[in-house]
Amino acid sequence: VAAGRAPRFVRRSARLSLDEWKILQERSAALGVTPSGLLLTAFSEVLACWSASPRFTLNLTTFNRLPLHPQVNRLMGDFTSLT
């Protein structure tokens, strides 16, 4: 962001039809990646194009409730990890 200018954020969203999702699954399988990995790669490429720096880090939260105790599913808390 240029000095003195506030960053501007816009939320964009879209949905794939069932047929589009199946095509995405087939293409990602042919590439040896998951559909999530394919979409994350596309997202990071868009960020790189619009970013002031093409080098950046993405921090992803993942659900990680480990089965360390028989009643772990009765616990409340933040069970996320960063990857």
Image (spheres, rainbow, N blue to C red):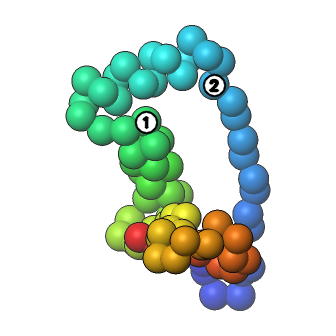
**On the rendered structure, is 37 left or right of 17?**
left
- Residue 47, given in percent of the width and then of the height, sits at 50, 57
First reached walking from the N terminus: tag 2 or tag 1: 2
Does the CB distance between marks 2 and 1 fall below 8 Å?
no
Q: Is residue 26 above or below residue 61?
A: above
Q: Secondary structure at mark 1?
A: helix
Does residue 42 show up?
no
Res 81 label: none
Image point (30%, 27%), residue name? 29
The residue depicted at 63 percent of the width and 25 percent of the height is 16
Name, please, the residue furthest toward the bottom: 4
Query: Mark 2 falls on what kind of element?
Result: loop
Q: Of the numbered discs in the image, which one, if any, rests on residue 35? A: 1
| Residue labelled with disc 2 | 16
Looking at the rendered structure, the kind of residue marked 1 is: Pro
Q: Position of residue 33 (x, y in %)?
A: 30, 38
Q: CA distance from mark 2 to mark 1?
A: 12 Å
Residue drawn 41% across the image and 70% down it: 83
